[in-house]
Image: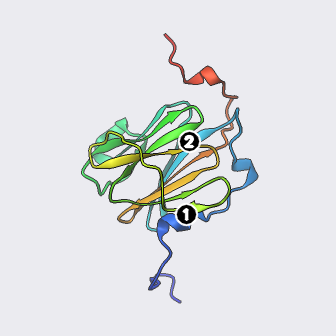
Amino acid sequence: MDPGEQLEHPIARELQVLEKKRYDFERPTPTHYTLEVAAYWDNDLLDQVESGRRRRVTVGAYTAGRRTHLIVELPLDAKRFTLARIRGRTAFITVPEQAQVALRTDDGQVSREVTRRPTSAPFPAYAVQIGFGDRLAFRVGKLTFVCQFVRSHGRARHALDWLMPY
């Protein structure tokens, strides 16, 4: 088969990225963790960002400038939006209503059924909560986002890290 040739019934891209093996050194620990968000266009990695100690990850188009953490051309009716809100060891991911979603839990089960929570976004959307070991992938058109907690190699975290200093 020619590498550029498309399969008749390809595996959905959001399911394909969840099949990627996760190594032990990538797994988050209670003291070393960060949220990783990756954006794919078809099979190509466009951009990837780790949250560090930020509590929000913002996605925007190239025209949104420096106000975004993850820069991709959006097929949505928004220049930029908050993709993830992080609260300690959990994150709330904003998913567009028309997106195809897949969630892989820590025990390896892949499901298209997710618990929807209300959220605010510049387009019709809902939020999905993920924690350690969960990987969420959703696709809008040819753009696929993958969100997961990974091991951080910085200094150890503390429960009070997320409080803003006065």
Q: Secondary structure at mark 1?
A: helix
Residue at the image position 60 percent from the left and 39 percent from the top: 34
**Image: 14 above or below 121:** below
Horizontal and vertical percent for residue 26? 69, 49
Horizontal and vertical percent for residue 121? 31, 42
Residue at the image position 62 percent from the left and 63 percent from the top: 20
Asked if labels 2 and 1 touch by Cβ distance under 8 angstroms, the answer is no
Residue at the image position 30 percent from the left and 57 percent from the top: 75
Type of amino acid under label 1: Val
Name, please, the residue furthest toward the bottom.
1
* Image position of 123 (left or right of 5): left
Q: Which residue is mark 1?
A: 17
Q: Which residue is mark 2?
A: 35
Horizontal and vertical percent for residue 81? 34, 42
Could you tell me if residue 81 is visible in this image?
A: yes
* Image position of 58 (left or right of 103): left
Name, please, the residue furthest toward the top.
166
State how far apart marks 1 and 2 are (Cα): 16 Å
Could you tell me if residue 61 is visible in this image?
A: no
Residue at the image position 60 percent from the left and 36 percent from the top: 89
**Image: 82 above or below 140:** above
Q: Nearer the viewer, residue 12 or 73?
A: 12
The part of the image, by quadrant, that contains residue 8 is: bottom left
